[in-house]
Structure formats: structure tokens, C-alpha cells
Amino acid sequence: MNKQPKYRQVADALRREIDSGAYSPGSRLPSESELSARFDASRNTVRAGLNLLVSEGLISSSQGLGYEVRKHEVFELNASRFENLTFPQNGDAYNTDVTNAGRRPHQTFRVELKPARDYIAERLKVEPGSTTVLRFCHRYVDAVPWSTQATYYPAWLAEEAPRLREPGDIADGTTRYLKDRGIEQIGYFDEIATRMPTPEEARLLELGAGVPVLLWTRTGYSAERPIRCTITTFRGDLNHMNYEIGDLSARVEAP
């Protein structure tokens, strides 16, 4: 005898059917009334089971449109090569990586002057509250929100590289632009964390309930000091990050 609550039995049955492919990504589930009849359960019980699947990120709900199986077209990001100027690129790293993966990049962009909060000031080694230039990108892959990227530059750097303050994107990428100005990034320090999204992050990335975000903070350094702090916020359900470190010749299969 199944001792699980009825709503969990509903969720377990639908989860198995989603995993088996009975309901493919993008397809709609039967209505609550149809599921109530199928499972001999009240609509509140069925709704509780469906909400459990929503919290797990398996399905999404839309007012008046019912429940839909979420699409999970995961994007593979090689964080070792991202922004590495020794690899050939046409434009900035994001456009290059997405295009090379056979996907379609799109981004919106803005520039602001922002006071450095403690987290940023510590990494840029500037006074908290001092002025930074924020270059903010809202990025998409195949028209699906993929990430937001907030890069903070100290005020002294914006004086030496004035295009950082301009509202338009820098087509060849800011790292290349800075190198051309004699300010070369020679190293970076990465920090990776996960958490649940803020309401603003959930809105920008169109996240369903229960989907976390991946935070990737990269602080870039010249030979003398930090030159930028970039915080990329990824959808946790659509991204896979990897690094390459050392000799990986044994990883490549012999022909």
C-alpha cells in the first residue's frame, strides 16, 4: 500500500512520464480537471502535486494556459576559454561562444555610473561608495533569457579608457579594447556560488519557482592592480560550466 500523500503520488506519476518522454519538452500537461479524474483526487490535491513539479523546475505554469513541460536546452560554457584572447574570436566572447555552438546570441545593453557596494569595492580595491562604471548586459541564447552580466570598472580606468563610459556596446569586447589601450588583463580570479534568485533576477531570466541561479564572479587583474569585477548570473536550469586545467590529452579519444 502506498503511504505517500496523494499529491506526491500524482507528482511521482507525472515525473516518471516526463522522464520517459511521454510528455516532451514544451508540451502541455492535461488540465487539472482531467488529472483529477485520472487520479481520483480533488483539484486541490492535483494542484499541490503540480506545484511540487513546478518547484523542481520540471514544469511551468501560466495563468489561463495550464502547465507546460520546461525545455532544457542546456548551453555548455567553457570558462577557461571565455575571454581568452589567445583563442580566435569574432567580436566579444559571448557572441563567439554562442555562435560557435550553433545557437543564436542576442543581448540588450546599458551603462551606468554606480557607487561601489562593499562586495565590489573589496574586489576592485577601491573605497566603498566610490564611483564605478557599470556595463550591464541582458543576454539570450535562441531568444531564451540565458544570463545577466554586470561588469564594474573603477573610475580611474574609465579616465584612461573613455569608451567604457559610452552607452553603446564595444564590438570587439572590452578586454581587447583595454589591451589596445595598454591595459592588459594578465590574470583573473573566479568565485562561483549558487542561491535562489531575487525577484528582479527571476523577472529578467524568466525563472519558474524552484529554479536557482549560478553566480560567477570574475575579477580581472593587470600587472599592477584589479581592473574590473564581472558578476554573471546564469539560469541554473539551462547552463553547464566547465574548466580546462593542465594537460588533457588523455581525455581526447584516440581516432
Image (spheres, helix red, strand yellow):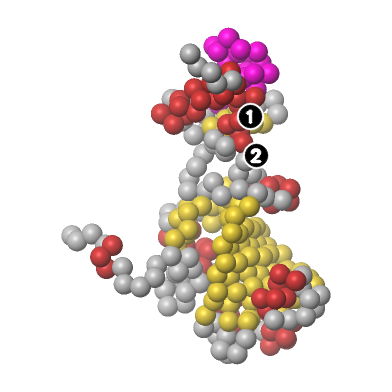
Residue displayed at 51% across by 39% down: 71
> Which label is found at residue 51?
1
| Contact check, label 1 and label 2, Cβ < 8 Å | yes
Q: Examine the rendered structure and indicate whether residue 65 appears above or below residue 70.
A: above
Which of marks 2 and 1 precedes in the sequence?
A: 1
Q: Which residue is mark 2?
A: 209
Amino acid tagged 2: Ala
* Left or right of 45 in this view: 74: left
Q: In terms of secondary structure, what is the magenta stretch mainly?
A: helix
Give whichever of 228, 104 is nearer the camera: 228
Residue displayed at 56% across by 49% down: 236
Q: Residue furthest left?
A: 255
**How many numbered callouts?**
2
Amino acid tagged 1: Asn
- At label 1, counting other C-alpha atoms closer than 10 Å, the crowd grade (few under 14, some 14-19, many 20 or more) is many
Q: CA distance from mark 1 to mark 2?
A: 9 Å
The answer, for residue 164, to whether it is visible in the render is no
Secondary structure category for the residue under label 2: loop
Whole-percent x and y of residue 48? 65, 24
Magenta stretch holds residue 31: yes
Whole-percent x and y of residue 108? 66, 59
Q: Give, as a single range, the part of the protein colored magenta.
A: 28-47
Give whichever of 183, 215 is nearer the camera: 215
> Which label is found at residue 169?
none
Give whichever of 66, 19 is nearer the camera: 19
Q: Examine the rendered structure and indicate whether residue 176 appears above or below residue 70.
A: below
Q: Quadrant of the C terminus?
A: bottom left
